[in-house]
Amino acid sequence: MDYKSAGVDIEAGYQSVELLKEHVKGTMRPEVLGGLGGFSGAFCLDKIKEMEHPVLLSGTDGVGTKIKLAFLMDKHDTVGIDCVAMCVNDVACAGGEPLFFLDYIACGKNYPEKIAAIVGGVAEGCRQAGAALVGGETAEHPGLMPEEEYDLAGFAVGVVDQKDLITGEQIGPGDALIGIASSGVHSNGFSLVRKVFEMTKESLDTYYEELGTTLGETLLTPTRIYVKALKAVRDAGVTIKGCSHITGGGFYENIPRMLPAGTMAAVLKDSYPVPPIFRLLQQKGGLEEKMMYNTYNMGLGMVLAVDAADVQQTVNALQTAGEQAYLVGEVMAGSEGVVLQ
């Protein structure tokens, strides 16, 4: 009897580490100390000393049941981007710069090439966010999880000078709401997606004219990372008064999170194009409109509140950064949270 016969292959773990080293190297920042393989990740904080009142920000999240689609399609190189995005977008939403990231993979059986593909996606997400991938853990759980399955979660740490924190406290009636386009469904609401569409390889490989690709490719499109986009707005001299990351709970739950008491958001549904996947999902599932806006991002991954005078400057900065941005509504006095018009 040995550990391998019990279901844990230590040699496969070593092979996984070797395969993913090249991915990790591409995420390094000058502040990272030491190499991959230590018991902890070391990150020098000298640059933080330049801030008046540095504040650390953190975010943790996973990919959720979207990961089931990766199993069915045997495509594992994008869910890592989702994992990073869900964490670093929350950090950026508070005005922070993500510094470093750690991932955690729990699997039924360690297949080194599969683990390397997953971590390759994590590394790509870190590159998009400008964060260093300083460590992680792959845990083999034989008997607890099916051999072909895994779960993926992550943790990000960022920093912001206290004076630059985005708190929403200065938002008031008359402020404009700027929406930044999503890349699709992102990483929320997939439990409902999996009820609406048949979850088979054949179904996911079905081409839809309105999508311009297969259903599976559309649904597996990774979550957009907005770190550099928000930095571009700040660098353009615009004060972001509030920022909402549109995740689970859609418009109705997330937009009010940035609003101070006595204010509400009026969003114009026709002010931007809703991606076809949402129309298809609503039609196939017979879903009510309110449920769609209460579950999905409906084409907007971030909503910013800025002074009305800064609308064009904000949109220009976002477009220059490669984003699609729209004036989607305004802040009003009231207590209804969000009103869709």
Image (tube, rainbow, N blue to C red):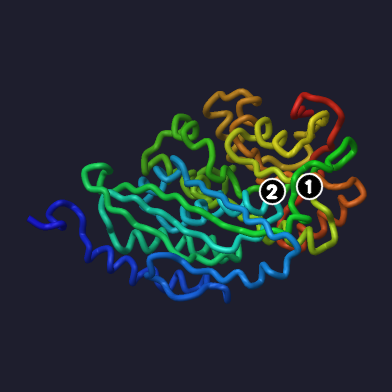
106 versus 160 height, above or below: above
Q: From the image, which quarter does the N terminus lie in?
A: bottom left
Q: Could you tell whether 270 is left or right of 300 in the image?
A: right
Task: Tell me which corner region of the image, top left, top right, bottom left or bottom right, holds residue 260.
Answer: top right
- Callout 1: 10 Å neighbours few (<14), some, many (20+)? many
Q: Name the secondary structure under disc 1.
A: strand
What's under tag 1, amino acid-wise? Tyr
Q: Residue at x 21, y 43 (%)?
A: 143
- List the single residue furthest toward the left: 1
Return the residue nearer the eye: 1 or 283: 1
Q: Residues within 10 Å of mark 2 (few under 14, many from 20)?
A: many
Residue at point 90% right, 45% down? 308
The residue labelled by disc 1 is 326
User: In the rendered image, which residue does mark 2 sit on?
Assistant: 181
Left or right of residue 105, residue 278 in this image: right
Along the horizontal axis of the image, is 75 left or right of 155? left
Mark pair 2, 1: CA separation:
8 Å
Query: Residue 242: image x %, image y %?
Result: 77, 45
Residue 180: horizontal and vertical position, in percent? Answer: 72, 49
> Between residues 131 and 149, which one lies in front from this camera angle?
131
At numbered mark 2, what does the secondary structure look like: helix, strand or loop? strand
Q: Are marks 2 and 1 in contact (CB under 8 Å)?
A: yes
Three-letter amino acid code at disc 2?
Answer: Ala
Percent x, y of residue 183 = 61, 50
